[in-house]
Amino acid sequence: MNTNATFRYPVALTIAGSDSGGGAGIQADLKTFSALGVFGASAITSITAQNTQGVRGIQAIFPEIVEGQIHAVFEDLTVDAVKIGMLHNREAARIVARSIDRFSPSKIILDPVMISTSGSKLIEDETIEIIVRELFHRVTLVTPNIDEAAFLSGMPIRDEEEMGIAAQKLLSLGCRAVLMKGGHLEGKEMADILFTRDEEAPLRLAVPAIHTQNTHGTGCTLSSAIAAYMALGKELPEAVRAAKDYITAALRAGADVKTGHGHGPLDHFFAPVPLIKMKI
C-alpha cells in the first residue's frame, strides 16, 4: 500500500433518500458527483419504492444508522461539501443538525425535498418545522422548487415577482441564501434566481424552456451539482451558474430518451469528467 500519497479526491457527501427507480435521491446525487469528477459519499435517510410514475412507499432508516453513516464518513474522509435531500422524519432532521455542529462542514446545500416531480408527498408534516428552525440557519444555500417555496412561504408563486417576495420570506426564516427554481412556471424560459442576504441584486439564470417529460430528479441533480462545484472550490454564485449549465445540458441530452412510463431521468453522463485529484 502506498503510504506516501500526495493527492486526494474532492469529496461531496449526500444525506438523502434512496430512489429505487434510479432517477432522483441518492442515486441522482452520486451520478452527478461522479459526472463532475467528484468522489461521492452517502448517508441514506430513507428507502423509497419508487419509479418514473410515482412513489409507492417510504421506509425511514433507523436513526442510529443514519447518524452512524454520517459519522463514519466525516471521521474518515475530508468532506468538501454536503448536500442534504429528503429528511423524512424529525429524528433525521435533528441528527443532521447535530452532525453539522459536530463536524462543521463549511459548504452545505439543503434541498428541502417535500414534493416529488410526480406530485407525491415525501415528508412528514411535523418534520418541516424542525427543518426550518434547525437547518435553515446552518446551511449555505436552500434550493426549493416552486411548490416547496410556496408551501414554506405561505403564498402562491405564479411569476418572478412573486418568486422574489417568497425568497425574502425564506431569507427572513434564517436562510443565508435561497435559489428559487422557476422550472415549474409556465413560460418560454426556465429561470432560476439566487437571492442572498449579502448581495443587493439577485442572480438570474435563464435558459429557453426545454420541452420534455424527462424531469425526474432535476431538483436533486441541481442541488448536488452545486455541492460538487463548491467541493471543487467554486464560490456560491459561480457554483450555481455552473450547476445551471450542467443541468440544462443534461436535460437537453436526455430529452428524447424514453426511460420508464412516466417522468424519465436526465442524462447525467452526457460529458463525464474523470475523478479529479487534489494536492493534499
Image (cartoon, rainbow, N blue to C red):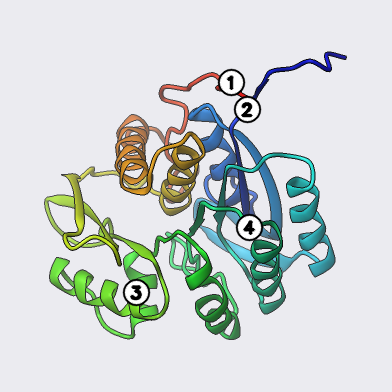
Density class for disc 1 (Cα within 10 Å; few <14, some 14-19, many ≥20) is some
Asked whether disc 1 touches disc 2, contact meaning CB atoms under 8 Å apart, the reply is: yes
Closer to the chain start, of discs 4 and 3, is 4
In depth, the one of 168 and 124 nearer the eye is 168
Q: Residue at x 50, y 63 (%)?
A: 139
Q: Residue at x 48, y 66 (%)?
A: 112
Tell me where residue 270 appears, x and y as whole percent: 41, 25
Secondary element type, mark 2: loop
In depth, the one of 91 and 102 nearer the eye is 102
**Mark toward the viewer: 4 or 1:** 4
Amino acid at the residue labelled 2: Tyr
Closer to the chain start, of discs 4 and 1, is 4
Q: Residue at x 18, y 74 (%)?
A: 162
Closer to the chain start, of discs 1 and 2, is 2
In depth, the one of 275 and 176 nearer the eye is 176
Q: Farthest residue toward the right?
A: 1
Q: Which mark is residue 277?
A: 1
According to the image, label 4 marks what residue? 104
Q: Is residue 248 left or right of residue 269?
A: left
Amino acid at the residue labelled 1: Lys
According to the image, label 2 marks what residue? 9
